[in-house]
Amino acid sequence: MKWMLFFLMSSVAWGFGANVIFVHPDGAGISHWQAARFYLAGPDAELNWDRLPHIAVYRGHMADALSATSNGGATSHAYGVKVPAGVFGTDGVSAGPAMSASGKRQSIMHEAMEQGIRTGLVNSGSIIEPGTACFVASAENRKKGEEITRQVVESGVDVILSGGEEWFLPVGTKGRHGGEGRRADGRNLADWARENGYAVVYTREELEALPEGTRRVLGIFANEHTFHDMGEAEMRTAGLPTYLAVAPTVGEMTSAALRFLAPGPFLLVVEEEGSDNFANYNNGQGTLDALKRADEALGVAMGFVEKHPDTLLVTTADSSAGAMDVLGFVPTPERMVLAVAGRDANGAPYSLDPDGKPFLSQPDKAGKRHPFVLVWGTRHDTSGGILVRAMGKNASEVSGSFDNTRIYSLMRDTLFDD
């Protein structure tokens, strides 16, 4: 938390070049942010997400499907080209990296590193999650966790903060987070990172204790994800919280990454994965908690841009997870009975708060709180209503209708002067 406050309050100016911060709250469509606003701020208030001044409608179709996959969408963001839905950092035809829109077989992040720009990847999920991993790894498919992790760790990215300890360790080796390794190649990638100049940390406290001037950091904050990846009933039965207490939030990781990447220029890609995974489980409380964390990360990034305007902050999702929407209602006794029944007249499931009651919004400007339920359409990712929002350098390019491949070109135009 102290690094978050540091970047929101600090008046230090480092003289950055052109920096890019791409924040990807996975699976978060317009309705997800609407729910988060009601729940966290109130219907007449604003989230950090609401305060981003430039806005466009996101168009995220794949080369062979109308709805995006996480891996296909991330590949389009990283390479600037339309790709099949099943790819992971490839074009689905050639082996290895896709051909990018700039005519190079390398992602925007590999190109940045080649030009001496510092880089960072932050994910509340496992290191293998494609929203960040596709920026430096290319694999046959997203199930190749062993190979994806190797490529991410050996990529040369300066700051890597995520979960996924299971993919760092050999089979049979117990990790700091209590799980066992899954690597069949016998390698210990955490040891490799230490030997190659990375400070390796495992908890929020260890991350915060890293000294000024630390240049390369590998944070491994969970055996799998930093959240409990499960549905509402399973979580309630097990008595588990949505997120692990020992792990830093995505906002805290973002703030730390900005500290370590100074003085730039840099490219930082940040993903809150819980907003997608919880929504795909139709876990309402988990989704709202994930969106709170994503909005905090946006607040950290916005504070940074305000002090360093030669920085682009852009945020979007590649899909709308669970086809979630908000159903608000006048709380008559009859309507409350229908709400707590947990299912709409057409059979669509509702999410209630952990006490089995409708969620309550924060007060509106008249001081009134309103009940609502979250209603789900699927357990898959949908095309949904998705926005691109931005502030800072070149943010005015975000307007009208914005194809997923333009995330790449916007980042590239900001990073490179060619």
Image (cartoon, helix red, strand yellow):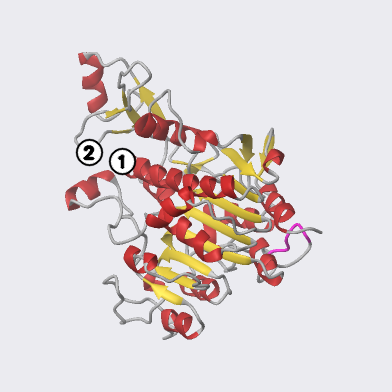
State the image coordinates of residue 229 (x, y, percent, origin top left): 33, 54
Residue 348 appears in the rendering: no
Helix, strand or loop for the magenta stretch, by majority? loop
**Residue, x 72% and y 69% (percent of image)?**
115
Q: Are marks 1 and 2 in contact (CB under 8 Å)?
A: yes
Q: Is residue 36 above or below residue 334?
A: below
Q: Is residue 223 above or below residue 383?
A: below
Magenta-colored stretch includes residue 394: no
**Residue, x 40% and y 47% (percent of image)?**
293
Give the extent of the magenta segment.
98-102
Residue 222 is tagged as none
* Residue 174 falls left or right of residue 62: left
* Residue 307 falls left or right of residue 185: right
Residue tagged 2: 354
Q: Secondary structure at mark 2?
A: loop
- Amino acid type at mark 2: Pro
**Residue, x 47% and y 56% (percent of image)?**
254
Q: Quadrant of the C terminus?
A: bottom right
Q: Quadrant of the N terminus?
A: bottom left
* Residue 99 falls left or right of residue 285: right
Q: Secondary structure at mark 1?
A: helix
State the image coordinates of residue 21 (x, y, percent, origin top left): 58, 53
Residue 285 is tagged as 1
Which quarter of the figure has residue 323? top left
- Amino acid type at mark 1: Gln
